[in-house]
Amino acid sequence: MSALDFRGHIRHLTSATMKKPFKSKVAKDHAASHATSATAASVESLAKSQPDSGNSRPLVGIIMGSSSDWETMEHAVITLTDLGVPHETRVVSAHRTPDLLFEYASTAEQRGLEVLIAGAGGAAHLPGMTASKTVLPVLGVPVESKALKGLDSLLSIAQMPGGIPVGTLAIGKAGAINSALLAAAILGAKHPAIREALRKFREEQTERVLANPDPSLAQAAAFRLTSPEPTSSDVEEPATSVATNAKRKPA
C-alpha cells in the first residue's frame, strides 16, 4: 500500500469512527431537549389547570414534597386566602421529581411569582433546592415527621450553607400560618392592599385577645369552680364513727 493510499485509509477509518458518537450525541441532546420540553409543558399545564385565588395572577407559590404534607400546608393556603393574596399550590418532590422542581423554581420569577413557600418533612431538601434555583425569597416550613417529630425537617431547612438562605419557620401548623403571614409582609412592601390586609389581620387578632382577658369567665357556666359546702351529715357521721371506735378500743 502506498503512503497516499495509507493516508486515505486512515482518513476513512477516522471519519467512520467519529460519525457514530456524533449521532449518539445528537440523539442524547434530542432526548434531553424532549425531556426538558415535557417538564416545561408540565409546569405550564399545571399553572393553567390550577384555579388561583381571586382574579389576579398568583404572587405566592406554595409547594410541598408530598400530598401527605397538605394537612400542614393547607393552613398557609387558608391564611393567604383570608388575606386576599393570590397564590398557587403544587406537589413538587425534590427527590422524586427533581426536573420538575428545577423547572418550577427557575421559571417562577418570569411567571410572576414573588415569594415561594416550600413545606417538606424528613430530609426536607425541597426548600433548599428551590432556593438554589431562584433569587426569589423562599420560606421553608418543616412538616412534622413520625420518627423525629419534625426536628429533622427543621434542621434540614434551617442549616443551609452560607450563600443560599431559606427563611425557616416553626414546625407544623404554626409554621405554615406564619409562612403565609411573612409572605404577606414581604409582598406588602410592594403591594399596599396586601400590607393593609395584614395590618387589619393584626388589629383583629389584638381585639380578640383584649375582648377575652379572663378565660375562666367563659368556662364558669360549664364547670363548677368551687367545691359544694359540706352538709351536716357529712360533718357528724365521722364524729360518731370515731366515738364508736373509741368505745370498742380495749383498755
Image (cartoon, rainbow, N blue to C red):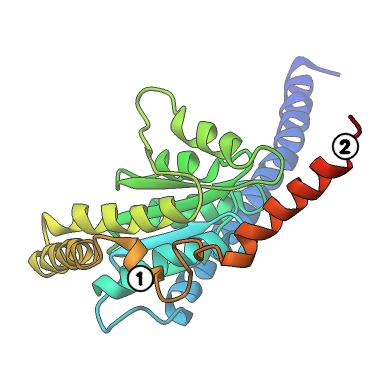
Q: Residue at the top extreme?
A: 3
Please state the horizontal and vertical placement of residue 232, each as a whole percent of the image. Answer: 57, 65
CA gap between label 2 and label 1 equals 53 Å
Name the secondary structure under disc 2: loop
Whether residue 85 is visible, yes or no, is no
Quarter of the view holding residue 200: bottom left
109 and 234: which one is in front? 234
Residue type at mark 2? Lys
Quarter occupied by the N terminus: top right
Q: Is residue 225 left or right of residue 79?
A: right
Which of discs 2 and 1 lies nearer the camera? The answer is 2
Above or below, 21 relative to 205 = above
**Residue at the disc numbered 1:** 218
Identified at 20% across, 68% down, the residue is: 211
**Residue at the disc numbered 2:** 249
Please state the horizontal and vertical placement of residue 68, each as a whole percent of the image. Answer: 64, 62
Residue type at mark 1? Ala
Please state the horizontal and vertical placement of residue 212, each as a whole percent of the image. Answer: 25, 66
Identified at 59% across, 48% down, the residue is: 144
191 and 201: which one is in front? 201
- How packed mark 2 is, by other alpha carbons closer than 10 Å (few <14, some 14-19, many 20 or more), is few
Quarter of the view holding residue 147: top right
The mark that comes first in sequence, 2 or 1, is 1
Q: Is residue 154 left or right of residue 27?
A: left
Please state the horizontal and vertical placement of residue 7, each as a whole percent of the image. Answer: 73, 21
Quarter occupied by the C terminus: top right
Q: Is residue 61 left or right of residue 232?
A: left
- How packed mark 1 is, by other alpha carbons closer than 10 Å (few <14, some 14-19, many 20 or more), is few
238 and 87: which one is in front? 238
